Structures are given as C-alpha cells and as structure tokens.
C-alpha cells in the first residue's frame, strides 16, 4: 500500500515564539524558550573556589553565577537547593539578575516549592529596575496569560522596554507583535525590521522566522533562496525545527538544488534531537525508501518514537501501517491502539478511520453507535468523507433510524467540499424532497457537479435529467452523450438508458435498442431483462421469439424483480382462464427455470 505521508514546512508557529515554559533535555521543542537559570550553555571553565569566595563577600554577580552552575550541574554537582539559596541571596542584595533567577526558582519549583505569587513579586521588582531580561519575560507572561491576565498591550509595552535596551529576544517578539497586529497596529514591514535586527544579534528563532516569512512572502517579497539561507543559519545553531525544515527544502529543491542526501542528513539531525515531526517524517522516508534504502523496520521504529511522544499524525500512520500495509505484519490490536490515541487527540483522519472500523467491524466489534460517534467528531472537524458516511447512515443504513433532515444536512456539507458521492446524494434529496424542499433545478446542478468529477451514477442522473427534461430543458442528444460516457466503461445502467434513447427515436432504432438492452441484461440489469423479454414476446419491431422472451423474463424473475413477477402472475391467471398462448409461454418459461417451486408463493 502506498502510504501518503504529509511532509510539510512547519510554519504555523504561535505569534509569540518565546515562552516561559522551561525545556528539558530531549524535549521535542528545542526553540530558545528557557528562563536564564536553566538555559545556561557555556564551555567556560569556572574557578568554583574563587566564585564562592566572591559570593561570600556578597558579590552578586558571583552569587548569580553559582546559582546557574548549581541549577545545571556545570562544574559542580547539581544542587537545586544551593541554586535557590544563591539566587535568593543575590536578589535580596538588590541584583536584578538575581531577582530573575529567584523568579525562575519559584516559578519552576527549583530548590523550593512553586509559588506563583512570590515568583511574580521578584520578577516585577527586576523589571521595574529596568532589567531587560525581566521585562522580556514579563511581556511573555502577559502575552500568554500566565500568572497574569492576558494583555497584549502590556506584553508590547514590556517587550518595547526590553527592546530599547538592546535585548534581542524582545526585538524578535516585538517584531512578531507587529506582524500579527497583537497589542499594536499590524505593520508587517515594521515587524520584519525588528526581527531582522534580532537576527543580526545571532538569534536562531529570528533566523527561523525570517526563513518562514520569505517562504510565505509575508512582509517581504517571496524568495525561496533567502528562505533557505536563513533556515540554514537557524539549523546550524542546532534548532531541530529548522533542521527539519531545511531537510524539506533540500528534498523539494526550494531555494537550493534538490539534494536527497543532504535532506536525509538534516532530517536525521532533527530526529536525533527528539523532534517528533522529524521522527515521524524520517519513519515515512525509511518506509517509502525516500533518501534511504527502503527499510520497513526502521520506518516503524522512527514512526513509533514520534507516536510515543504523542504525535497524533504519527499515531494515525502507525495505525494504518499495522492495519492495511502489505509489508507490515497485520496487527489489529496495535492498529486500534494507535488509531484510538490519535483520534482521542482530535486528529480528524483518525476519528474518521475509527468510525469506519466500528462500521465495518475491522479490528473491533461492529458498533454502529460508536461509528456514529467517531464519524460525528470527524464530520464536525470538516472531514467530507465522515460527513458523507454520517449522511449515509442517517439515510437508514445499518439499522440507524432514518432521518432525512440530518441525511441532507451532512450530505450537503460534504458535497460543498467536492465529495462526488455526497453531491449525488444531495441531488437525489432535492429531486425527491428528502430533508429539503423539492427543487429539481438544484437536483440537476448537484448531479452535474458530481458528474464532472467522474461519478458514473451521476452521468446517468444527468442523462436522465436531459432525457426527461428534469431541472433542465429536454435534450435527447445531450442525454445520449452522457449515457455514452457510462457505456464506454461498460456500465449496465448507462447501457439500459442508451437503449431507451434509441427506442424513443422517431423512428425507433431497434437494432441499437436490442443491442444495448441485451448488454445491460447480460450484466444482470433486471429492467433491461424485462424490457428485452417483452420485446421478444410481442414481436413488435423485432422478430417474435418466445424462447428468448422466456429466457430474459426468467432471469429478472429469479431476481424477484417485481415487474417480472407481475408478468408471470398475469400469465398464470390467463392460463387458468384457458388462454393457450399463456399456457405455451409458461411451458417454455418453466423448462428453463432453475427451481420453479422457489417462486410459487410470490407468483
């Protein structure tokens, strides 16, 4: 089975790219969104003894340095209580940096119990002393509504205070505010200018944002080459999301010559950092043999890594692989397990798949109420196939109570998204007034939309509309043209309808009529079998042939087709009245019947 992995550029970042949530090693999100105490990265060899001597002399810089070192275990055994102690000592001696570190300890529970009130107290004190890092963090908290009421205007105010002191992250976030018009009038050019300024300080998230802006052409002319240049800078700084996107640019040859080997290298780097989107995509590439030799087991391994991180799309694909892939051992338990996890996260494709599983009893016991539940979730998320399935069930399928209003409502939602079968269903609803007011013109319009997508049932419906003048001016030649489309595919309904067109021709074209009735009849079309039998029985326009008549009426009769049953019933009544023609025909009919007693009661 060819699994279609949805590999794309992940440009949909939140407007505020920097958040106060601390990242731990191995998290999927490796963007620079840590507080200072946990974001220390240095190769500098520290003289711990000298630092401690200075700290004991109330040197606040030394105290802050020790707080960072103990928090991260750099050069000293990790000791969060000591980190808290040195941060508190620096803060109480009036160090704005120490106040930010103490805020972080209270906010994140480092060396002390979490205490949002104390955290905000120290952060505000630092911000009011014009410490740019504190001002920036305060802006982020206002932007996200963490520990304070969400207030985009306050966020911009604090970002601007930090930006005016040259704080690069504040430049970046202020630029994002301008881009999206949050807390300030939207001005994309001004936004780009601030982000560019932050990029010149070497801020990786600004490199990433500029790459995205050039890809989208937002605030700058669209330029894939510049997008690639900025994405490369971000990737070289170790951003996993940038490494992932760089891999996609290399794969697609956007802004750079296509190079699957380099794409694979950067994708592997991102996946090795635990970036779930990269792990999912790497699994897909191994499974498909894209940039790698096809390796189903490695594909499953990487897809599973992403799925275990809660990546809903990876969970969905694992479900598909364990359920229907030819080169993966079937495992209905794992299929349903992963599909359920994905569906419970709101992934609409998985919800739709769960609906189908419960409808068909595939991997689970058939359960129509659960099928309705999962189809409903996917349908409300806008999945047209789920909407169509709901409509089909409300049409009275699988024991669901017939509800023409819900049937028409869900069918129309799917039809408006271009679902061909739903368009056909909506056409039928308007034709018969099922759940909607009868409107034959609308019926014809929906049939036509479905027909244009190649729905053979709709070809016949459009042809019938032209033939009968339903919702459109009668046009037998147009009807013939639509029926001919189905005939070319061997559709028995189109063959039957084409026979009708030739029969009503003036004069009737009987050779073609019999030819197409016979082709449809040979495929089991019961009405064609009856019509062909009647033609042979009466010998009108064709040579009378009671053997042929009996053969075709018998085939329809064996399908319990009502018109055939009525014909035989009428003939038996005439036979009982002494009609010799009826007796003769029934004798011929009964000679070929497979089980004459089978229909005795019906007849």
Image (cartoon, rainbow, N blue to C red):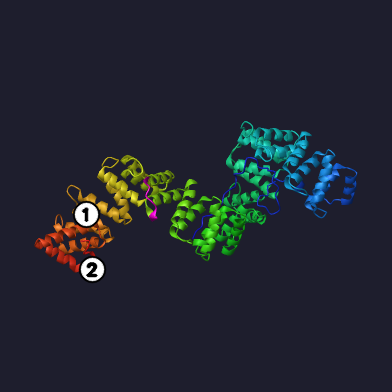
Q: Which residues are magenta?
A: 398-404
- Badge 1: few (under 14), some or many (20 or more) residues near its Cα, within 10 Å? many
Return the x and y of residue 324 as percentages of the image width and height. Answer: 49, 61
Q: To which quarter of the image does residue 415 belong?
A: top left
Which is more toward the observer, 202 or 439?
Answer: 439
Return the x and y of residue 224 as percentages of the image width and height. Answer: 60, 44
Left or right of 33? Residue 537 is left
Return the x and y of residue 144 as percentages of the image width and height. Answer: 65, 40
- Residue 94 in view (yes/no): yes
User: Mark 1 = which residue?
Assistant: 513
- Residue 131 in view (yes/no): no
Q: Name the secondary structure under disc 2.
A: loop
> In the image, is residue 135 part of the stretch drawn in magenta?
no
Left or right of 402? Residue 511 is left
Q: Give the vertical position of 235 relative to 195 (above or below).
A: below
User: Mark 2 = which residue?
Assistant: 595
Q: To which quarter of the image does residue 597 belong?
A: bottom left
> In the image, is residue 399 part of the stretch drawn in magenta?
yes
Left or right of 546? Residue 278 is right
Q: Name the secondary structure under disc 1.
A: helix
- The quarter of the picture where the C terminus appears is bottom left
Return the x and y of residue 191 as percentages of the image width and height. Answer: 65, 35
Looking at the image, tell me whether mark 2 or mark 1 is earlier in sequence order.
1
Q: Residue furthest top?
A: 185
Q: Residue at x 82, y 50 (%)?
A: 82
Q: Give the vertical position of 149 relative to 457 (above or below).
A: above
- Badge 2: few (under 14), some or many (20 or more) residues near its Cα, within 10 Å? few
Left or right of 137? Residue 223 is left
Q: Give the vertical position of 525 relative to 436 (above or below).
A: below
């Amino acid at each position: 089975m060819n699994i279609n992995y949805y590999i794309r550029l992940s440009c949909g970042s939140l407007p505020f790219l920097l958040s106060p949530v601390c990242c731990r090693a191995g998290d999927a999100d490796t963007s620079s969104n840590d507080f200072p105490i946990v974001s220390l990265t240095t190769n500098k060899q520290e003289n711990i003894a000298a630092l401690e001597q200075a700290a004991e002399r109330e040197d606040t810089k030394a105290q802050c340095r020790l707080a960072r070192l103990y928090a991260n275990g750099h050069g000293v055994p990790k000791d969060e209580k000591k980190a808290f102690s040195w941060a508190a000592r620096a803060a109480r001696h009036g160090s704005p940096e120490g106040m930010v570190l103490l805020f972080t300890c209270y906010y994140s529970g480092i060396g002390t119990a979490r205490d949002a009130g104390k955290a905000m107290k120290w952060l505000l004190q630092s911000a009011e002393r014009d410490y740019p890092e504190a001002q920036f963090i305060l802006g982020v908290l206002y932007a996200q509504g963490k520990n304070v009421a969400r207030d985009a205007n306050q966020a911009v105010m604090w970002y601007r205070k930090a930006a005016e002191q040259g704080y690069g992250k504040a430049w970046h976030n202020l630029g994002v505010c301008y881009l999206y018009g949050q807390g300030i009038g939207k001005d994309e050019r001004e936004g780009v200018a601030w982000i560019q300024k932050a990029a010149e300080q070497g801020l990786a998230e600004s490199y990433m944002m500029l790459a995205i802006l050039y890809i989208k052409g937002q605030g700058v002319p669209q330029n894939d080459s510049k997008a690639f240049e900025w994405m490369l800078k971000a990737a070289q700084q170790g951003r996993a999301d940038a490494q992932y996107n760089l891999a996609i640019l290399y794969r697609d040859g956007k802004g750079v010559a296509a190079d699957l080997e380099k794409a694979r290298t950067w994708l592997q780097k991102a996946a090795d950092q635990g970036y779930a989107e990269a792990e999912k995509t790497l699994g897909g590439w191994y499974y498909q043999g894209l940039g790698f030799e096809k390796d189903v087991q490695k594909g499953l391994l990487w897809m599973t890594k992403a799925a275990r991180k809660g990546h809903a799309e990876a969970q969905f694909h694992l479900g598909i692989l364990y359920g229907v892939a030819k080169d993966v051992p079937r495992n209905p338990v794992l299929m349903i397990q992963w599909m359920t996890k994905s569906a419970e996260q709101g992934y609409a494709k998985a919800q739709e798949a769960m609906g189908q599983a419960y409808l068909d009893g595939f991997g689970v016991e058939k359960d129509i109420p659960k099928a309705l539940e999962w189809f409903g979730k996917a349908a409300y998320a806008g999945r047209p196939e789920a909407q169509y399935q709901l409509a089909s069930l409300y049409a009275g399928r699988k024991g669901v109570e017939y509800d023409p209003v819900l049937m028409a409502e869900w069918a129309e939602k799917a039809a408006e998204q271009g679902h061909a079968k739903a368009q056909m269903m909506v056409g039928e609803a308007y034709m018969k007034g099922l759940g909607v007011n009868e409107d034959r013109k609308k019926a014809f319009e929906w049939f036509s939309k479905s027909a244009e997508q190649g729905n053979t049932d709709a070809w016949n419906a459009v042809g019938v509309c032209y033939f009968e003048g339903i919702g459109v001016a009668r046009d037998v030649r147009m009807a013939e043209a639509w029926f001919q489309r189905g005939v070319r595919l061997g559709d028995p309904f189109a063959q039957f309808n084409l026979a009708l067109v030739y029969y009503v021709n003036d004069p009737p074209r009987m050779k073609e009529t019999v030819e197409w009735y016979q082709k449809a009849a040979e495929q089991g079309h019961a009405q064609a079998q009856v019509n062909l039998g009647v033609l042979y029985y009466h010998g009108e326009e064709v040579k009378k042939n009671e053997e042929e008549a009996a053969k075709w009426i018998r085939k329809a009769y064996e399908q319990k087709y009502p018109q055939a049953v009525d014909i035989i019933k009428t003939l038996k009544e005439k036979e009982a009245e002494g009609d010799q023609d009826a007796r003769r025909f029934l004798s011929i009919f009964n000679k070929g019947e497979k089980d004459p007693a089978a229909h005795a009661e019906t007849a």
